[in-house]
């Protein structure tokens, strides 16, 4: 079964004060590291955001179909690209997600008929931006956007997402303080 990975890079990074996707990480920038993890598990990888902003990276970039509507519009663009039946969606600000967990999400999705397989970290927090969405989710996502319902957690409830636990935290890096703490913990 064909799989695709997508990194959502279209956010405004207001709390960080600069583009989170382009923060320095390992030997490149954060989005490259995350896209590399997706490349290890999916048949193809693309970024979802402003193509002009990320043209210098070696990944195709798909623009949002509706700008300014948050991550739900990024998921819409990913699914609308029709690259695969199973679409692994990951936010650009989750540097510690491991490729083994992403592989597990895809394996569960391949073996089930579920429309959405979503991560839940060790603290019980669910992560709809670390999840697999079947292409069949597109009508539900479009309808929510058409109706102005932008809360992703509500949409994944409608999709009756199956939750897969991971034994470690999944951290979103949203502020300079969180970024500095992560870098300190990793010896930067």
Image (cartoon, rainbow, N blue to C red):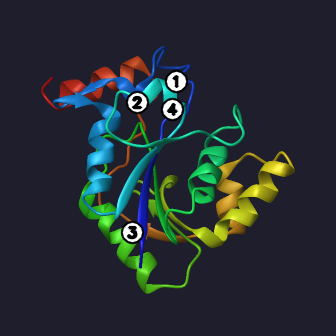
Which quadrant of the figure contains the C terminus? top left
Q: Nearer the viewer, residue 9 or 186?
A: 9
Q: Earlier along the polypeptide chain: callout 4 or callout 2? A: 2
Dot in front, 3 or 2: 2
> Quick one: label 4, few (<14), some, or many (20+) residues within 10 Å?
some
Q: Are marks 2 and 1 in contact (CB under 8 Å)?
A: yes
| One can see residue 9 in this view | yes
| One can see residue 122 in this view | no
Image quadrant assignment for residue 47: top left
**Numbered badge on residue 105:** 3
Query: In the visual, does 52 lie left or right of 177?
Result: right
Residue 145, above or below 112:
above
Residue that numbered label 2 is attached to:
21
Q: Secondary structure at mark 1?
A: loop
> Quick one: label 2, few (<14), some, or many (20+) residues within 10 Å?
many
**Numbered badge on residue 13:** 1
> Quick one: label 3, few (<14), some, or many (20+) residues within 10 Å?
many
Residue 98 image offset from top left, x and y in percent: 26, 54
Query: In the visual, does 185 lie left or right of 55?
Result: left
Q: Are marks 4 and 2 in contact (CB under 8 Å)?
A: no
Q: Earlier along the polypeptide chain: callout 3 or callout 2? A: 2
Q: Earlier along the polypeptide chain: callout 4 or callout 3? A: 4
Dot in front, 1 or 4: 4
Q: Earlier along the polypeptide chain: callout 1 or callout 4? A: 1
Image quadrant assignment for residue 175: top left
**Numbered badge on residue 51:** 4
Residue at x-position 30% and y-position 37%: 32
């Amino acid at each position: 079964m064909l799989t695709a990975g997508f990194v959502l890079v279209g956010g405004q990074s207001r709390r960080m004060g600069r583009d989170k996707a382009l923060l320095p990480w390992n030997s490149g920038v954060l989005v490259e590291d995350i896209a590399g993890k997706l490349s290890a598990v999916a048949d193809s990888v693309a970024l979802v955001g402003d193509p002009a902003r990320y043209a210098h990276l070696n990944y195709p970039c798909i623009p949002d179909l509706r700008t300014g509507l948050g991550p739900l519009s990024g998921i819409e663009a990913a699914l609308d690209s029709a690259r695969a039946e199973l679409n692994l969606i990951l936010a650009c600000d989750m540097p510690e997600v491991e490729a083994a967990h992403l592989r597990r999400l895809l394996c569960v999705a391949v073996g089930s008929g579920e429309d959405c397989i979503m991560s839940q970290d060790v603290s019980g927090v669910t992560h709809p931006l670390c999840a697999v969405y079947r292409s069949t989710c597109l009508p539900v996502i479009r309808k929510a956007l058409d109706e102005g319902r932008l809360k992703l957690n509500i949409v994944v409830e409608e999709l009756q997402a199956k939750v897969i636990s991971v034994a470690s935290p999944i951290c979103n890096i949203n502020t300079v303080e969180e970024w500095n703490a992560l870098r300190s913990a990793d010896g930067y």
